[in-house]
Amino acid sequence: FFSPSVDAVRAQVQQKMSLETTEGNSINISCSHPKKQMEDYIHFYRQLQGQSPELLALAARGSKDVLNVAGQLWVSEDGSSNALWLGWPRRGDAAVYYCALGP
């Protein structure tokens, strides 16, 4: 069972508190940020149990491959929402995933 947890780092970022999928079935971890400014970037981190947070990807808009989780980060054209897609999650990808907004 693959069970990532998700947390909002800032009050202006809205993200579901938990998601679940089974190993090998893709999942979208999405968040919205209605107060995003054009110069802000979306940062996606994951924190494996007992480790420090690890930056997975950052983007202002568009999509970007995220190789270390076999996925992709997508940010809407207006920047108000995004999703981290994990294509083939493995048991080792079970972690807390953070979506943050910043420079």
Image (cartoon, rainbow, N blue to C red):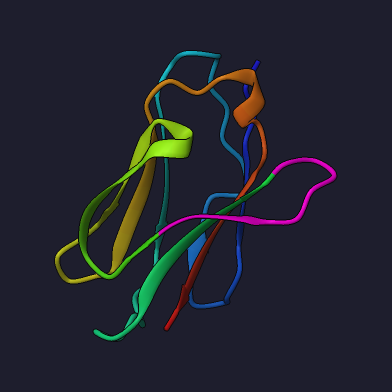
Quarter occupied by the C terminus? bottom left
User: Extreme front residue here?
Assistant: 67
Query: Residue 6 placed where, x, y %?
Result: 60, 49
Q: Work out whether 56 lies above or below 21.
A: below
Which stretch did the figure color magenta? 48-57
Residue at x 46%, y 65% (from the top left corner): 43
Majority SS type along the magenta span = loop
As drawn, is 68 to the left or to the right of 63? right
Give the residue at x 46% y 74%. Answer: 101
Front position in the image: 66 or 100: 66
Estimate the x, y position of residue 25 in percent, counting from the top left. Answer: 43, 16
Picture layout, residue 41 above or below residue 63: below
Q: Residue furthest left?
A: 77
Residue at 49% x, 77% y: name it.
Answer: 12
Q: Quadrant of residue 18?
A: top right
Q: Position of residue 81 (x, y in %)?
A: 31, 61
Q: Would you say 30 lies left or right of 23 here?
A: left
Look at 49% across and 64% down and name the residue there. Answer: 14
